[in-house]
Amino acid sequence: MTAASTPPADVLAAGGIDPRWSRVVRVGGRSWHLLDNGPTLDAEPVGTLLCVHGNPTWSFLWRRLVAAGARTERPWRVIAVDQLEMGFSERTGEQHRLADRVAELGALTDELSLAGPVVTVGHDWGGVVSLGWALDHPDLLAGIVLTNTAVHQSADEPLPTALRVATAPGVLPVGTVTTPAFLEATLALAHPRLDAAVADAYRAPYRTAERRAGIGGFVTDIPAGPDHPSRPELDRIAEGVSRLDVPALLLWGPRDPVFSARYLRDLRTRLPHADVHRFEGAGHLVVEDADVAGAVLRWLDARDTPARAVEAHEPFRALGATLVERAEDEGTALIELAGPRSRRVTWAALAARTEQLARGLAASGVRPGDRVALLVPPGADLTAVLYACLRLGAVVVVADAGLGVQGLTRAVRAAEPTVVIGIERALVAARWLRWAPTLVSAGPLRAGVATALGVSASLDELAALGRESTDDLPWPDADADAAILFTSGSTGPAKGVAYTHRRLAAMRDVVARTYGVGPDSPLVAAFAPFVLLGPALGATSASPDMDVTAPGTLTARALAVAVRAVDASVVFASPAALRSVVRTADGSELAALAGVRLFLSAGAPVGVPLLEAAAALLPAAEVHTPYGMTEALVVADVTLDELRTAGSGDGVCVGRPVPGVRVTVSALDADGEATGAPEQAVGVTGEVLVSAAHVKERYDGLWLTQQESARDAGWHRTGDVGHLDGDGRLWIEGRLAHVLVTADGVRTPVGLEQRAQSVAGVVSAAVVGVGPRGAQQVVVVLQPEVYSHGPVVAEPDLAAAVRAALAGTDVAAVLVVEHLPTDVRHNSKIDRSRVAAWAERVLSGERARL
């Protein structure tokens, strides 16, 4: 038996811990060490945060939260305990079961005379212990915060691999007690690697085998089987969590080999009201990897902020209403052109297939609110199953295959679907990468594949099941979630954007209202969202024969074939697709394209020369370039004629807000941050803010990101930077994340890039900052028409011409590359962050590849 003690001064110093926070408390003959900022608070605290660590950490884990809680305004008392046998608390030599630990924590808080309101905070197995305390103290409980933990382990489901190894009879004592292997393996899970002094501080209480006995005891107490002594207490806590009617926050590190996505999914099921934030790139030690302390305090403050007023809504008409209305119409709804032969689908057939699939999904166990990931190319199958999910009330999850396996895996796992519907190669990835428990095939599978992958059904089988169903199928509520749409990831990991049925319907309405697209406007779209809107708009639609993950594969001939197939009057193509169309045109397409009345190109800034080249191919079309984003599909619009007369400026003119949309800016300060309130001032550069009925409901599983984007009531912060001119037109100058802060002040990249691209021989340009913010050097990286694979530094004549074009800006270097990296969706938005990192390495003397 070894009594509790306070940590050595060097350990406290490593964590920036005020020695006055460290104290020892005796409870029932046992001594506990804990961190408690109460003695140093200058004002009455709002409440208490009770923080419980897991295995093999100690209260040091919560040091930043202890410090942050001691703020001057709205302080919180933070108590972080060392559980018995752990950290610097007493070594009693006893085995503590889960029920013991819950009871012991209750005895400690009784000794401390803890009064409400109390918010529990837990990590790892400390999360379970904290929830047990919460269930036992409902009169004190005001909220719960959980970080990478689990409250349920099915008896027929294996433990995570790391825990199976640790609990193996021959491994457990050696790996957890005799040696520090378990401790070291846990510390190695930090992303990035822990500072040496911090890692040593975690080791400090566990220097000897005797002091590591509690680590082994914790592992021994993992209730892996149904007969484990702690199983009843785990079951009690798991069953009781859903009765905790208090605010909840789940903060998660997705790169956790122990508490994987299935545990987060289980917690969200038990706490459906919980706010969730996934820290992309963080892992098991999320409290070390990310600013968990800041997130907790921001969440606590937000609980006391009045909810924003409910927006006035237009009358709601479901997105799939047109299919019901045209269920007897034998006219063409869509034509599928990809592959060796075309496929025509009538309105009647599409409506019937949609209803059958909706009923079949319901009969197979899919419920309203369940998430269904759709990994199906644009066409009849994707259209039918998407509208079937909306009809049922299942939430469709749509992510670009162009994100690549890693990006797509991150996106799909973040959305936590229960079902993946996909073509064969998507199902192979879904099974081996564990994207969802249930797989449904869309299209043919090779012999034996369905059995090997455990595919539960095909779309045809679901439709047959639906034809037999007579169950009532109510329409979903207008304000229920309808879809999770993923961004292109052009400024970081792709984000899931949640839309309700009402907001999707508003998106349909703004497109119809702005562009007059409807039953009399057949549509060709080389961009999946516009194809999928076709049935909602009542427009016959076609998707041209192309690889939708690579817009540059669209040819002029393929576009002409699609236009001719539906006698299209409206065409949408991204800038990359448009460049390919212009490049591959030989004049033979003109007759087919002559009847197009409206041409749209968006997704990235589109230059006048490219639009004029497109206009030459579609001579009767009015050429528009809409401005929008995944979070709000149409925000502003400008015509080619308006662009011709707008002149040049610091950015790209994207026109005036479309009807029903308000746009303003939040001014940038001297540090390049958008700190200002929304304002309409002419010529003020700032972050672009948007307000409209079709703006996203929220970011999914990204509570902090959502809070930041909606911090101005009624407005969405887009992350774009721009200004409004005297005619009410919006000019986009770049992304907030790409703003340069030099010694001469703030610079935005787009205007400078346009001037660089005006130099003869330059195809594209990226302007980035190298060096510390506030003293960044301006570097221009060019994609020239002719690339020699030689030095990355531009030829003197080209560099001089670029510097002349950017007169007034001190350019530190002009570099050249064969290709500038772009986003996966439109192949048009330059990844300036990647370019900046590459330029910094090159200018430091490294041989780096972009």
Image (cartoon, rainbow, N blue to C red):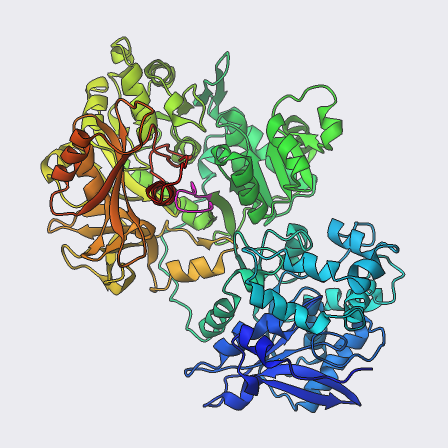
Regarding residue 392, the answer to whether it shows in the image is: no
Name above or below for residue 734 compared with residue 114. above
Front-most of residues 639 and 646: 646
Front-most of residues 523 and 321: 523
Our reading of the magenta stretch's main secondary structure is loop
Residue at point 85%, 73% (across, down):
95
Q: Quarter holding the N terminus?
A: bottom right
Name above or below for residue 702 compared with residue 848. below
- Indicate the quadrant where residue 640 lies: top left
- Indicate the quadrant where residue 667 lies: bottom left
Residue at point 15%, 39% (across, down):
803
Residue 251 is situated, as x and y percent measured from the top left of the image, at: 56, 62
Residue 845 is situated, as x and y percent measured from the top left of the image, at: 36, 41
Front-most of residues 241 and 805: 805
Is residue 490 inside the magenta stretch?
A: yes
Image position of 222 (left or right of 792): right
Image position of 741 (left or right of 405): left
- For the record, the magenta segment spans 486-494
Which residue lies most toward the top here?
A: 588
Which residue lies most toward the front here?
A: 845
Residue 490 is situated, as x and y percent measured from the top left of the image, at: 39, 42
Image position of 476 (left or right of 843): right
